[in-house]
Image (cartoon, rainbow, N blue to C red):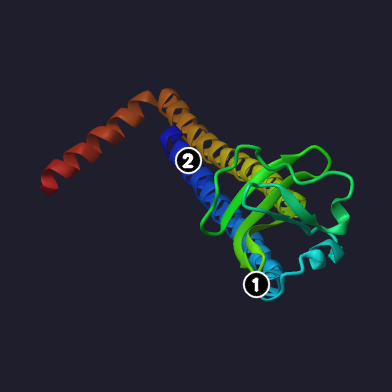
Amino acid sequence: MLLFCTVVGVLLAGSHLAFYVLLAREIHAQLDRQLVESSSPVVADLEEDADISDVGELNIPDEYFELLDASGRVVAHSRNLTNRLLPLPANRAPISQSAFETVDGPERGHLRLLLIPVKTPGGNRVLVLAMPTRHSDSVLLTFRHMILVFLSLSLAIMGVSVGLVCGQGLAAHCRVNAACEGNGETCFRSRASGALATSLGE
């Protein structure tokens, strides 16, 4: 019975963990798709127009834009980045294709970044778009709490059920033993008769 409880507990924990991993992967993929969709019109505008001042006019809540030159210097940024720029590594290597990164900002918390190389009429640039991950983190945190509560309740219910079944079986066994101890000879004769009948039947 203990082995059964252990196996069931491991299966429950494993299934919840697998579901959590799939959910986390889908939430992160959804955030990445949102980054791509939000950056697409800006990239198209930069590829057609050499004027980069349009980036400085952007002021979308929870969307932070930066435009870097070939050396990694910020040449334009959105209006909601007036106080502090994005926390990009100083020794970043040049990129040739779009890349995602997650950084920790001192003021905005965790940020998911999309870096896109752009060929503008004025030269090669890198567009950086950042979005906070607090919503995704909040969803995953809530789901983790739900898993812990549900798993604890499931194990507790299973433990109580197994305890009741074992208790009933033990009580029945004790009653049989008590009956046999009170009527030892009768019980012995009954067992002997049953064994004899079985041997004759064979």
- Asked if the residue under mark 1 is in contact with the one under mark 2, i.e. CB atoms within 8 Å, the reply is no
Q: Residue at x 73, y 41 (%)?
A: 87
Q: Quadrant of the N terminus?
A: top left
Which of the pair 180/84 is nearer the observer? 84
Foreground residue among 148 and 84 = 84
Question: Where residue 15 appears, x then y in whole percent?
Answer: 51, 50
Q: Judge whether 179 appears above or below 103 on screen.
A: above
SS at mark 2 in the image: helix
Relative depth, front residue between 99 and 201: 99
Residue 118: quarter of image: bottom right
- What residue type is disc 1 on? Glu
Residue occupying the point 45% across, 24% down: 182
Tell me where residue 78 sits by quadrant.
Answer: bottom right
Task: Name the spot of residue 28 as percent of width and height, x first.
Answer: 62, 56
| Residue 16 falls left or right of residue 120 | left
Q: Which mark is residue 195?
A: none
**For the point 68% across and 51% down, which residue is it?**
112
Q: Secondary structure at mark 1?
A: helix
Residue at image position (84%, 41%) is: 107
Q: Nearer the viewer, mark 2 or mark 1?
A: 1
Q: Which mark is residue 10?
A: 2
Please determine whether, in this image, residue 35 is positioned above or below residue 108.
below
**Residue lying at the far front of the rendered structure:** 122
x and y percentages locating residue 7 in the rendered image: 43, 40
User: Is 181 positioned to the left or the right of 43 in the image?
Assistant: left
Foreground of the two, 196 or 80:
80
Q: Amino acid at mark 2?
A: Val
Which badge, 2 or 1, is on the more N-terminal residue? 2
- The span from disc 2 to disc 1 (Cα, nearest Å) is 54 Å
The quadrant holding residue 67 is: bottom right
What x and y, as percent, mark residue 193?
23, 37
Q: Which residue is mark 1?
A: 47
